[in-house]
Image (cartoon, rainbow, N blue to C red):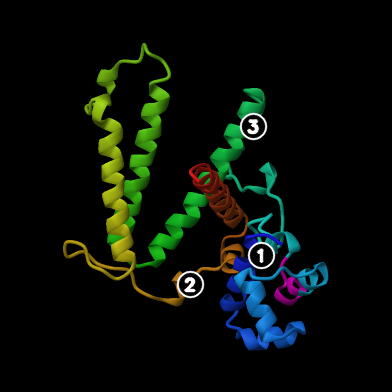
Amino acid sequence: MNSDFPRVITLLRKERGISQKNAAADLGISQALLSHYEKGIRECGLDFLVKTANYYNVSCDYLLGRSPEPAGKTIQYDDIPDFDPNHKEKISAGGASGVMASFNKKLVINALSVLFSLVQKTGSSTVLKEVSTYLMLAVYKMFRVVYSANPKNDPNFFTVPEVIAAGSSAAAMAVCEANASAAAQGVSVNGGDTAKESPDTLITANSLSEEYSGSASSLLNVIKNSEARMHIINNSEK
Protein backbone atom coordinates (compact mmCIF):
# COMPACT_ATOMS: atom_id res chain seq x y z
CA MET A 1 0.00 0.00 0.00
CA ASN A 2 2.01 3.01 1.23
CA SER A 3 3.38 4.52 4.43
CA ASP A 4 0.37 6.81 4.93
CA PHE A 5 -2.32 4.09 4.98
CA PRO A 6 -1.34 2.46 8.31
CA ARG A 7 -1.04 5.85 10.00
CA VAL A 8 -4.36 7.15 8.67
CA ILE A 9 -6.49 4.10 9.47
CA THR A 10 -5.06 4.00 13.00
CA LEU A 11 -5.70 7.72 13.46
CA LEU A 12 -9.29 7.44 12.18
CA ARG A 13 -10.08 4.55 14.50
CA LYS A 14 -8.68 6.31 17.55
CA GLU A 15 -10.35 9.63 16.67
CA ARG A 16 -13.69 7.88 16.64
CA GLY A 17 -13.02 5.99 19.86
CA ILE A 18 -13.42 2.55 18.26
CA SER A 19 -11.46 -0.36 19.68
CA GLN A 20 -9.33 -2.37 17.31
CA LYS A 21 -11.43 -5.45 18.11
CA ASN A 22 -14.71 -3.72 17.19
CA ALA A 23 -13.29 -2.12 14.05
CA ALA A 24 -11.99 -5.48 12.87
CA ALA A 25 -15.37 -7.11 13.46
CA ASP A 26 -17.19 -4.31 11.61
CA LEU A 27 -14.77 -4.61 8.68
CA GLY A 28 -15.08 -8.39 8.54
CA ILE A 29 -11.48 -9.30 9.34
CA SER A 30 -9.58 -10.61 12.36
CA GLN A 31 -8.14 -8.25 14.93
CA ALA A 32 -4.70 -9.69 14.21
CA LEU A 33 -4.99 -8.82 10.51
CA LEU A 34 -6.20 -5.28 11.27
CA SER A 35 -3.28 -4.91 13.67
CA HIS A 36 -0.93 -5.90 10.84
CA TYR A 37 -2.54 -3.34 8.52
CA GLU A 38 -2.26 -0.59 11.13
CA LYS A 39 1.40 -1.42 11.77
CA GLY A 40 2.20 -1.60 8.05
CA ILE A 41 3.31 -5.23 8.35
CA ARG A 42 0.88 -6.36 5.64
CA GLU A 43 -0.76 -4.63 2.70
CA CYS A 44 -4.49 -4.78 2.15
CA GLY A 45 -6.33 -5.35 -1.10
CA LEU A 46 -8.46 -2.87 -3.01
CA ASP A 47 -11.70 -4.31 -1.61
CA PHE A 48 -10.58 -3.62 1.96
CA LEU A 49 -9.44 -0.13 1.02
CA VAL A 50 -12.90 0.70 -0.33
CA LYS A 51 -14.62 -0.96 2.64
CA THR A 52 -12.48 1.05 5.06
CA ALA A 53 -13.25 4.29 3.21
CA ASN A 54 -16.97 3.58 3.48
CA TYR A 55 -16.66 2.55 7.12
CA TYR A 56 -15.00 5.79 8.18
CA ASN A 57 -16.86 7.89 5.59
CA VAL A 58 -13.69 9.24 4.02
CA SER A 59 -12.19 9.06 0.54
CA CYS A 60 -9.67 6.50 -0.65
CA ASP A 61 -7.37 9.39 -1.52
CA TYR A 62 -7.42 10.46 2.13
CA LEU A 63 -6.64 6.93 3.31
CA LEU A 64 -3.67 6.81 0.94
CA GLY A 65 -2.38 10.24 1.95
CA ARG A 66 -3.04 11.70 -1.49
CA SER A 67 -5.36 14.35 -0.05
CA PRO A 68 -5.15 16.05 3.37
CA GLU A 69 -8.96 16.31 3.50
CA PRO A 70 -11.22 13.43 4.56
CA ALA A 71 -13.49 14.08 1.58
CA GLY A 72 -10.50 13.78 -0.74
CA LYS A 73 -11.07 17.14 -2.38
CA THR A 74 -8.22 18.74 -4.30
CA ILE A 75 -8.09 22.38 -3.32
CA GLN A 76 -8.49 24.97 -6.07
CA TYR A 77 -7.85 28.71 -5.94
CA ASP A 78 -11.55 29.61 -5.83
CA ASP A 79 -12.13 27.11 -3.01
CA ILE A 80 -9.99 29.20 -0.66
CA PRO A 81 -12.00 31.94 1.07
CA ASP A 82 -10.82 35.52 0.67
CA PHE A 83 -9.63 36.77 4.03
CA ASP A 84 -11.24 40.11 3.28
CA PRO A 85 -14.63 39.41 1.62
CA ASN A 86 -14.69 42.98 0.30
CA HIS A 87 -11.45 42.50 -1.61
CA LYS A 88 -11.16 39.90 -4.36
CA GLU A 89 -7.50 39.00 -4.90
CA LYS A 90 -6.31 39.85 -8.41
CA ILE A 91 -4.34 36.96 -9.92
CA SER A 92 -3.82 38.09 -13.50
CA ALA A 93 -0.69 40.19 -12.92
CA GLY A 94 2.59 38.32 -13.13
CA GLY A 95 1.35 35.33 -15.12
CA ALA A 96 1.96 31.93 -13.54
CA SER A 97 4.07 33.41 -10.74
CA GLY A 98 1.27 35.86 -9.94
CA VAL A 99 -1.23 33.02 -9.70
CA MET A 100 1.11 31.04 -7.44
CA ALA A 101 1.72 34.06 -5.20
CA SER A 102 -2.01 34.72 -4.81
CA PHE A 103 -2.76 31.04 -4.20
CA ASN A 104 -0.06 30.65 -1.55
CA LYS A 105 -0.99 33.96 0.06
CA LYS A 106 -4.58 32.80 0.50
CA LEU A 107 -3.43 29.43 1.83
CA VAL A 108 -1.16 31.01 4.44
CA ILE A 109 -3.59 33.73 5.53
CA ASN A 110 -6.48 31.29 5.97
CA ALA A 111 -4.27 28.76 7.74
CA LEU A 112 -3.12 31.49 10.13
CA SER A 113 -6.70 32.50 10.87
CA VAL A 114 -7.47 28.92 11.92
CA LEU A 115 -4.25 28.72 13.93
CA PHE A 116 -4.99 31.89 15.89
CA SER A 117 -8.51 30.69 16.60
CA LEU A 118 -7.10 27.44 17.99
CA VAL A 119 -4.48 29.31 19.99
CA GLN A 120 -7.21 31.37 21.67
CA LYS A 121 -9.00 28.16 22.64
CA THR A 122 -6.01 27.12 24.74
CA GLY A 123 -6.90 29.97 27.10
CA SER A 124 -3.23 30.79 27.56
CA SER A 125 -1.84 34.27 27.02
CA THR A 126 1.64 32.73 27.08
CA VAL A 127 0.87 30.45 24.15
CA LEU A 128 -0.69 33.36 22.28
CA LYS A 129 2.28 35.66 22.91
CA GLU A 130 4.92 33.10 21.97
CA VAL A 131 3.12 31.87 18.84
CA SER A 132 2.53 35.46 17.72
CA THR A 133 6.16 36.44 18.28
CA TYR A 134 7.39 33.33 16.48
CA LEU A 135 5.30 34.16 13.41
CA MET A 136 6.41 37.80 13.46
CA LEU A 137 10.02 36.63 13.51
CA ALA A 138 9.35 34.31 10.57
CA VAL A 139 7.91 37.22 8.57
CA TYR A 140 10.90 39.35 9.58
CA LYS A 141 13.36 36.70 8.40
CA MET A 142 11.70 36.28 5.02
CA PHE A 143 11.31 40.04 4.58
CA ARG A 144 15.06 40.39 5.01
CA VAL A 145 15.59 37.69 2.38
CA VAL A 146 13.40 39.56 -0.11
CA TYR A 147 15.02 42.87 0.84
CA SER A 148 18.44 41.45 0.00
CA ALA A 149 17.32 40.65 -3.57
CA ASN A 150 18.33 44.18 -4.59
CA PRO A 151 21.89 45.09 -3.54
CA LYS A 152 20.96 48.78 -3.74
CA ASN A 153 18.63 48.43 -0.76
CA ASP A 154 20.18 50.21 2.21
CA PRO A 155 21.23 47.75 4.97
CA ASN A 156 20.67 50.52 7.51
CA PHE A 157 16.95 49.87 7.09
CA PHE A 158 17.53 47.32 9.88
CA THR A 159 19.11 47.85 13.29
CA VAL A 160 20.44 44.29 13.51
CA PRO A 161 23.43 43.73 11.18
CA GLU A 162 22.91 41.20 8.39
CA VAL A 163 25.83 39.08 9.55
CA ILE A 164 24.02 38.13 12.79
CA ALA A 165 20.36 38.61 11.82
CA ALA A 166 19.71 35.09 10.55
CA GLY A 167 21.26 33.39 13.57
CA SER A 168 19.74 35.77 16.11
CA SER A 169 16.22 35.52 14.67
CA ALA A 170 16.48 31.72 14.48
CA ALA A 171 17.56 31.64 18.14
CA ALA A 172 14.66 33.90 19.14
CA MET A 173 12.25 31.67 17.22
CA ALA A 174 13.62 28.58 18.97
CA VAL A 175 12.98 30.20 22.37
CA CYS A 176 9.42 31.14 21.35
CA GLU A 177 8.77 27.60 20.17
CA ALA A 178 10.13 26.12 23.40
CA ASN A 179 8.08 28.48 25.59
CA ALA A 180 4.89 27.94 23.58
CA SER A 181 5.37 24.17 23.62
CA ALA A 182 5.94 24.14 27.39
CA ALA A 183 2.87 26.29 28.12
CA ALA A 184 0.74 24.22 25.72
CA GLN A 185 1.71 21.08 27.65
CA GLY A 186 0.94 22.59 31.04
CA VAL A 187 4.43 23.68 32.08
CA SER A 188 4.65 27.26 33.33
CA VAL A 189 7.46 29.40 31.90
CA ASN A 190 8.73 32.22 34.13
CA GLY A 191 5.48 32.19 36.08
CA GLY A 192 3.30 32.50 32.99
CA ASP A 193 -0.04 30.77 32.52
CA THR A 194 -0.55 27.46 30.72
CA ALA A 195 -3.05 25.95 28.32
CA LYS A 196 -6.32 24.63 29.69
CA GLU A 197 -7.34 21.16 28.58
CA SER A 198 -10.85 21.33 27.14
CA PRO A 199 -13.00 19.73 24.43
CA ASP A 200 -12.40 22.89 22.36
CA THR A 201 -8.75 21.95 21.88
CA LEU A 202 -9.48 18.40 20.69
CA ILE A 203 -8.51 18.54 17.02
CA THR A 204 -9.22 16.12 14.17
CA ALA A 205 -9.37 16.62 10.42
CA ASN A 206 -13.15 16.32 10.61
CA SER A 207 -13.52 18.79 13.47
CA LEU A 208 -11.42 21.34 11.58
CA SER A 209 -13.48 20.91 8.41
CA GLU A 210 -16.75 21.19 10.30
CA GLU A 211 -15.82 24.28 12.30
CA TYR A 212 -13.71 26.24 9.84
CA SER A 213 -15.20 25.16 6.50
CA GLY A 214 -13.04 26.43 3.61
CA SER A 215 -10.29 27.77 5.85
CA ALA A 216 -9.57 24.29 7.18
CA SER A 217 -8.60 23.19 3.66
CA SER A 218 -5.86 25.79 3.68
CA LEU A 219 -4.43 24.58 6.99
CA LEU A 220 -4.61 20.91 5.97
CA ASN A 221 -2.82 21.67 2.72
CA VAL A 222 -0.16 23.75 4.51
CA ILE A 223 0.46 20.75 6.80
CA LYS A 224 0.66 18.33 3.85
CA ASN A 225 2.97 20.58 1.82
CA SER A 226 5.22 21.25 4.82
CA GLU A 227 5.59 17.57 5.66
CA ALA A 228 6.26 16.72 2.02
CA ARG A 229 9.14 19.20 2.09
CA MET A 230 10.46 17.67 5.31
CA HIS A 231 10.28 14.15 3.86
CA ILE A 232 12.34 15.32 0.88
CA ILE A 233 15.00 16.73 3.22
CA ASN A 234 15.03 13.63 5.43
CA ASN A 235 15.28 11.28 2.46
CA SER A 236 18.12 13.29 0.94
CA GLU A 237 20.14 12.85 4.11
CA LYS A 238 19.96 9.05 4.04
Q: Amino acid at mark 1?
A: Phe
Q: What residue occupies the far right of the structure in this picture?
A: 47
Which class describes the residues within 10 Å of circle 1: few (<14), some (14-19), or many (20+)? many
Q: Which mark is residue 26?
A: none
Measured as percent of width and height from the top left, residue 153 is found at 35, 15
- First reached walking from the N terminus: tag 3 or tag 2: 3
- Secondary-structure class at tag 3: helix
Q: Nearer the viewer, mark 1 or mark 3?
A: 1
Q: Is residue 89 visible?
A: no
- In the image, residue 85 lies at what x, y percent? 58, 45
Q: Quadrant of residue 192?
A: bottom left
Front residue of 213 and 154:
154
Q: Tag 1 or tag 2, which sits nearer the N-term? A: 1
Give the residue number, with chain letter if any, for mark 2: 202
Amino acid residing under circle 2? Leu
Q: Please tell me whether mark 2 or mark 1 is closer to you in this view.
A: 1
> How far across and how far down the image is residue 180, in percent?
31, 58
* Residue 40 within the magenta-colored segment of the rendering: no
Mark 3 is on which residue type?
Answer: Val
Marks 1 and 3, how far apart in space? 32 Å
The stretch in magenta equals 52-58
Q: Is residue 143 left or right of residue 104?
A: left
Mark 1 secondary-structure assignment: helix
Dot 2 lies on which element? loop
